Amino acid sequence: MHPTSQQGAVIKQAAEWYQRLKHGELDEAARREFRAWLNVPANLVELARICLIDAGLQRILKQDARVLPKNVIDFDSYATVTRPRRLPPQQRTATSRFSIRRIALVACLVLAVSVATWTGLGSSDYVVVTRQGHWDKQLLDDGTVVYVGPNTKLRFHFTEEMRAVTLVRGQALYEVAKDPGRPFVVSTDAGTVRAVGTAFATSDLGDTVVVTVAEGKVAVTATAARNGVQPMVYATANEQVVLSPNGVSLPVEVKADRELMWVRNWYEYEGERVADIVARLNKLNNAQVIIDDPQVLRLRVNLLIFKPSQPEEFVHKINLWYAGYPGKASPSALHLERP
């Protein structure tokens, strides 16, 4: 029997959600969308079926369907579904909608991710993902605060001995809670950053990773080895180093607060040209700032504070300021276009 077009769409959606869940590709907006999708019984059953096939839950159900292993996640955690009361035998049917749902609830999801991957709560193993134009802030179980920039993916693995983070892509700032017995280590393709209690950021630029220290001290080790030895340097507050295929650079002095404003989703003017701000905003957001009067690009604004996640605020403030500018070529300097 071939599935109908509607059934085929549900199967495709379930397969796509399963892959996204398995690989931790969910930000807060996607988690809300997933919860809404689960509220449809047919979707719930199809996703459970895929999980059964992939994980071999038949063996678990044969042994004891009432005892679920640690890596099995109950749908009750995500779907706003009310468990039906148990019906008398005479009212039960083999094809009951509630029976199917109950099977799905018992089957649950066997995934290689933890509950935190789906809900965004702190846990020992989970993934944080942000999309274009979205910032996030996470409070971890150990008290560490992580600011996550757009287009970023982080994997967390905490044990009793180590707090390990993998920066897959993007930019993040870590305000690390002190725990001398458990070093905080961020791994990247170019190398690692090790700290105990400090504040630092890692920014993956493709071929290089920039490490900026706001507080304390970190040890930065390059993946690339020289004469069989992995080079390592120390960086302290208001210093920056660069990891690359060639190793790790010597620290240079920077203003860490200025360098880290964008990942905190906060911008406060200090002499930048309008052109530089527009370029940065357009790189981080789906909504694009469009130039109406090119001469505004070379100007420097005396006072400007806004959130990079709200480019409309930037456009509004620039246009208010530009309204009194002499010799302007257009009534407005900028406007915003959304996709």
Image (cartoon, grey):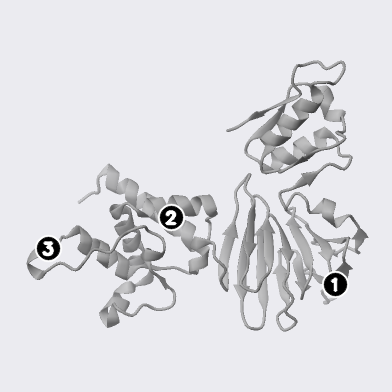
Q: Is residue 16 visible?
A: no
Mark 1 surroundings: few (<14), some (14-19) or many (≥20) residues within 10 A: some
> Which SS class for mark 3?
loop
Query: Where is residue 177, by image quadrant?
Result: bottom right
Q: CA distance from mark 3 to mark 2?
A: 30 Å
Give the amino acid at mark 1: Pro
Q: Residue at x 82, y 29 (%)?
A: 297
Helix, strand or loop for disc 2 = helix
- CA–CA distance in space, label 2 to label 1: 42 Å
Q: Secondary structure at mark 1?
A: loop
Q: Which residue is mark 3?
A: 93
Confirm or deny contact between disc 2 and disc 1 (CB under 8 A).
no
| Image quadrant containing the C terminus | top right
**Rendered residue at 28%/48% (across/down):** 7
Numbered mark located on residue 231 in the image: 1
Rendered image quadrant of residue 255: bottom right
The label shown at residue 17 is 2
Q: Residue at x 33, y 67 (%)?
A: 52
Task: Indicate the amino acid at tag 3.
Answer: Thr
Image x and y of residue 190, in percent: 75, 64
Q: Position of residue 215 (x, y in %)?
A: 83, 66
Q: Tell which tag, 3 or 2, sits nearer the viewer.
A: 3
How far apart marks 1 and 3 lie (CA) works out to: 69 Å
Q: Nearer the viewer, residue 245 or 109?
A: 109
CB within 8 Å, label 1 to label 3 = no
